[in-house]
Each structure stands twice: as structure tokens, then as C-alpha cells.
Image (cartoon, rainbow, N blue to C red):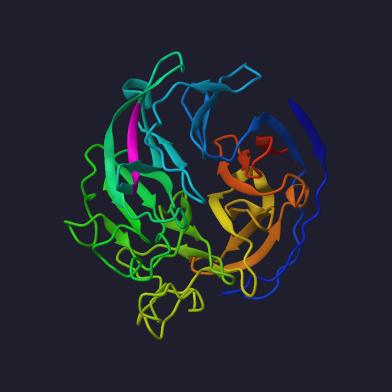
Amino acid sequence: MRAHVAATAAMLVLAACGSAGPEPAADLPKLDITTLADGLDHPWDVAVAPDGTILTGERSGRFVALRPGVTEPQPIDADLSDLFARGETGLMGLAFAADFDTSRELFSCQGYTHGVQQDVRVVTWRVSTDWQRLERTGVLISGLPSRTGRHGGCRLILEDSDTLLIGTGDSAQPKVSQDPNSLGGKVLRVDSRTGAPAEGNPLPNSLVFTLGHRNIQGLAVQPKTGTIYTAEHGPDVDDEVNRIVPGGNYGWKPDRSGDWYDESVPMTDPDRVPGAIPAVWSSGASTIAICALTFLGTEWGNWSGAIAVAALKGQQIRLLKLSTDGKSVTAVTQLPELNGTYGRIRTVQSQPDGSLLVTTDNGGDDQILRVRPVS
């Protein structure tokens, strides 16, 4: 285990869209950055159990647990013989059931293959009390489109104790994101017990909550308001953070050239998708490949309540300060200590004590970090 403490100074720039103008630069807190685990291979997500165990899953197919008081991560026995792991797809999002203490239930998102069948699905597991084994108990959702391994999504988060949100990718197929009958390029909202459409969905018989997305790799629910935000990869411009409105269409429509997946179209295309909802924030002329996003706790001073977004290509955690109505961004900065220091960053997740859990995604000696504000 390694740790260091470094002082930071805010690097304030204007938001790419929705800015209300410059604000005075505000100091970021000093950070204590600790390596909790290393030697991992593309750890995609983290989930923290009530007993403090940190669970991650390597994209190529391995569950790993870091138990409290144990310095080395321990592999968990699980049957992943049907895993489809190629490109961006493999073992992806993780979430513990709200009643994990009694049910021991875990949700995971994975690429699946068996014979000629291939898709992305949400699988349920029962975790042994000693954290040595995962027993597969069922499939909550199947049929998320998959083709080459591109744009597989797939982020999971509980909206409440009974409702699971699933962010999906469009599988790099031109008509998927705008097809209301496809589960790709969507935010899905499902009953976490049955896999049925959640109560209050725009269409009672549909899992689809919103459509017109390219590849959702981040989901977060804003504390107090319950507003849902997504982080989405753009093609070569315009990564987006979106504020989710039930039934909303977010304007990705890459079928301008018929059956060709035309990535030269705008990320949000109001001309070809009337009523398309504009992004809260966009990276603009160059993508940084944003992934997970989370909300900072009260321990972050003037940046408390801001969105923290992980970036792969950008190798950073970017902070976005929201306007009062949550529909635009008023200021942007990043955490200098993580800017290029640890390589590609896949996941950032806020914890009750105000710290962030962070996973790197370099494919060699990847890490789980704890980033803690200390002043």
C-alpha cells in the first residue's frame, strides 16, 4: 500500500457549454491518495459492500475482492465461461442489491456468448459469506445489442432500493440508438427484483427510460434532488454529460448514410432529431473519453456538490460545477495530482466519508485508489 499527500491549486476554465461566465478560482482541498490494490487488469467498476469489502471486476473476466484489513486483493471463484470479452466489452458494471446484508445479491453487467448467440446482459449472483465464491442465480436483463465489442456500455446504479438504472451502448450499429424497441443506446429503468419495467416509466410496458445515446459509461443520481446524469463517449468530438429527463431523446442518430454507421453526425442532432435534449456539458472539439461520474460530498469545499468525471484518454478526473437548476455547468477544473499521473481512469465513485474510489484502466498493473480530501 502506498500513499502520498500533495497540495493542489485549482485550474479554472470556462465550461464548454452552458457557462454563466467566469467565477473566482476556488482552492481545491489537499488530497491524500492511497493505493488500495494494484496488479489488476482493466478493473472496470467498484462496489462497496456494507462490511467495507471492495469488489471489482476485471474486464477480461475475473472478480476480485479487497477485504477490510487485508492488504492484497483476493480473486473470487465465479463461472464466467460464457463471457464475451472483446474490445470495450467484457465484465463491466457492478452493483450490490439494497438488501445485500440479507440477500447477498450482486448485479453485474457482462458481454455474453453461447453458440451463435451474443448480447450484453445483467446477471445476478449470490456472494458467499466468506467472499470466496459467487453463485450465479439468474439473468435480470438480456438482449442488449452486441456485435464487435464496440459500445457495450454498461453502467449499473440503484436509483432506489427497488429500481436499477442501466446505461447501455449502441453496439456501433446505425439504427439502434433511435429504435424504441432496442435496448441499446438507452437508459433503462427496471425493477431490480424482477427485471420488469420500473413503475413510472414513460411507457409502462417498456424498460426504456431515455433514448438517443451513443455509449453510456457513467450514471449518477444527484443527492437530494434524485436527478439522473449520464457520461457518454463522443465520436472524435463532444463527449457529453447529460441530465436525464424521462422519455427524453438525446439526439444521437448515426444512420445518415443508410446502413453505414456514420460517426460524422453531431453527437446531439436537433435538426434530424427534433426536440433532442442538449448536453449539460460537452468536451467540445476534442474528446477526453469520459466514463464514470459521481457527485462530490460536503468535504470538497467550494466544489462540494460538483460532478466528478473520470476520463480515459484525458487521464484525469474533471470537476463540473452545476448551475442552480442543474441544466448547465458554470465552472470546470480538474484534480492536478491525477492529471496523467496514473494513466487512464475508468471509474470514480464517491463514498460516504467524502473520499473517492478510483480505478485505472491501463492494462498493466492497474490500481484501485482512494482519493481523500484532507483540508
- What is the x, y in percent for residue 122? 34, 42
Quadrant of the frame with the C terminus: top right
- What is the x, y in percent for residue 85? 47, 43
Magenta segment: does it hold 124?
yes
Q: Quadrant of residue 71?
A: top right
Whether residue 64 sits left or right of residue 318 in the image: it is left
Decide: is 357 above or below 99.
below
Q: Which residue: 49% across, 68% down?
A: 327
Query: In terms of secondary structure, what is the magenta stretch mainly?
Result: strand
- Residue stretch in magenta: 119-125
Q: Nearer the viewer, residue 166 or 263?
A: 263
- What is the x, y in percent for residue 185? 38, 61
**Furthest residue toward front:** 115
Q: Quadrant of residue 247?
A: bottom left
Decide: is 41 above or below 1.
below
Residue 233 shows in the view: yes
Q: Which residue: 66% across, 35% down?
A: 367
Residue 192 shows in the view: no
Whether residue 297 sits left or right of residue 160 in the image: it is right
- What is the x, y in percent for residue 128? 39, 17
Q: Nearer the viewer, residue 24 or 123?
A: 123
Q: Nearer the viewer, residue 347 or 158?
A: 347
Whether residue 164 sits left or right of residue 34 in the image: it is left
**Furthest residue toward bottom:** 271
Decide: is 212 above or below 309.
below
Magenta segment: does it hold 252?
no
Q: Which residue: 29% across, 47% down?
A: 116
Q: Nearer the viewer, residue 142 or 213?
A: 142
Quadrant of the frame with the N terminus: top right
Decide: is 38 above or below 254.
above
Query: Number of marks in the image?
Result: 0
